[in-house]
Amino acid sequence: MFEGLMVLLLRPYIDSTDLVPALIVYRLVYYLVPLGIGKHRQVDGAGDVVQRELGRRAGVDQVIKPGQGRGQGVGDGRDRGHRAR
């Protein structure tokens, strides 16, 4: 629609054989550049999420000692309602 309107309105000033390729390039840039940027950010973002998750899991492995089950808690007892001395 936009391209057709531009060809009609600019007919007195620019030949349509010059205008149509420029409008096609405009549309390619208009759609493909944001798509490429989004895809690049999605791939980079996925790598960040994986690295963050691996780092988080590594931190959990350091806090939970071997032989200590999850849910038993780590700390001085404050998380279970006991007073710390």
Image: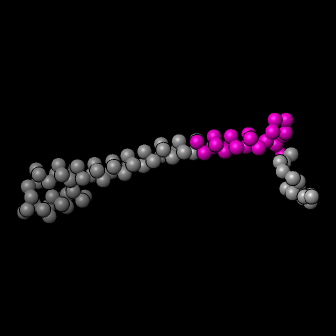
Viewer-proximal residue among 65 and 17: 65
User: Is 75 left or right of 3, judged from the image as shown?
Assistant: right
On the image, the x and y values in percent for residue 40 come to 42, 45
| Residue pictured at 58% horizontal, 41% vertical | 50
**Which is nearer the eye, 31 or 4?**
31
Q: Residue at x 85, y 56 (%)?
A: 79
Q: Residue at x 15, y 58 (%)?
A: 7
x and y percent of residue 36 in the render? 37, 46
Q: Which quadrant would the C terminus be assigned to in this image?
A: bottom right
Say left or right for 72 vs 21. Answer: right
Q: Main secondary structure of the magenta part?
A: helix
Q: Is 64 included in the stretch rendered in magenta?
A: yes
- Across and down, in percent, residue 9 comes to 14, 64
Q: Which residues are magenta?
A: 51-71
Q: Residue 4 at x, y = what percent?
A: 19, 57
How many numbered marks appear? 0
Q: Tell me if residue 39 comes above or below residue 83 in the rendering.
A: above
Which quadrant of the rendered structure holds the N terminus?
bottom left
Q: Is residue 42 left or right of residue 77?
A: left
The residue furthest top is 66
Q: Residue, x 33% and y 47% (percent of image)?
A: 32
Q: In this rendering, would 8 be left or right of 30? A: left
Question: Which one is in front, 53 or 27?
Answer: 53
Residue 58 higher or lower than 20, as above or below: above
- Is residue 63 depicted above or below 15 in this figure? above
Residue 81, image quadrant:
bottom right
Colouring convention used in this rendered image of the protein: one colour
Q: Was residue 23 drawn as part of the magenta stretch in this picture?
A: no
Q: Residue furthest front?
A: 85
